[in-house]
Amino acid sequence: MLATEYAKYYRIEPQGTAESDSNFKSRVSGKLRDAGNIIEAHEVAQDKRYDADGGENVMAGIAGAMAMAIQGKDYGSKGSSLIGDEIAAGTLAMSPKKEVDQMTLLMKILLAQ
């Protein structure tokens, strides 16, 4: 489980004996996100590396964090709640049903700087 690996690396308290895997992942991903470790936080939340098969939600979360930062959006969330907000924002930003491909627009903005 990535949460265990990242908890050791970032010196986050290990999983307690009464703590479920789900609660541990949520706690570790929240602490990582609060510390600004966006990629690692989303990897822990999904228990997948961003570049692995099935890492779509990780990429959506990273894209959502970027989109929210560029737009100056702050929904007042912290920790693991922010992870969910970023996944939702990234999913919307990458939606192929939009008239304007927001992900392409986002990449153009990033490349122009």
Image (tube, rainbow, N blue to C red):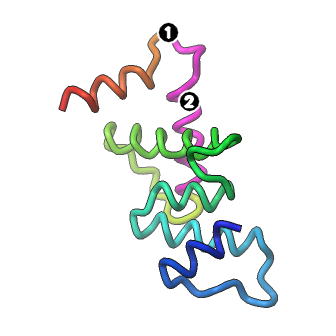
- The percent coordinates of residue 29 (x first, y second) are 58, 66
Report the residue marked by disc 1.
Answer: 99
Mark 1 lies on a secondary structure that is: loop
Q: Is residue 74 left or right of residue 93?
A: left
Q: Residue at x 67, y 69 (%)?
A: 25
- The percent coordinates of residue 4 (x first, y second) are 65, 76
Counting the numbered discs, the total is 2
* Amino acid type of the residue tagged 2 in the rendering: Leu
- Gap between marks 2 and 1 measured at Cα: 12 Å
In this view, the residue in front, 26 or 85, is 26
* Amino acid type of the residue tagged 1 in the rendering: Glu
Q: Tell me where the magenta segment starts and ends, as one range.
A: 82-98
Q: For the stretch drawn in magenta, what is the main secondary structure? A: helix
Report the residue marked by disc 2.
Answer: 92
Is-magenta flag for residue 96? yes
Q: Residue at x 64, y 70 (%)?
A: 3
Instruction: Using the image, determine if residue 112 lies above or below residue 32.
Output: above
Q: Residue furthest left?
A: 113
- The percent coordinates of residue 73 (x first, y second) are 38, 44
- Which circle marks residue 76 in the picture? none
Q: Are marks 2 and 1 in contact (CB under 8 Å)?
A: no
Q: Residue at x 70, y 84 (%)?
A: 15
Q: Residue at x 68, y 58 (%)?
A: 47
Is-magenta flag for residue 13? no
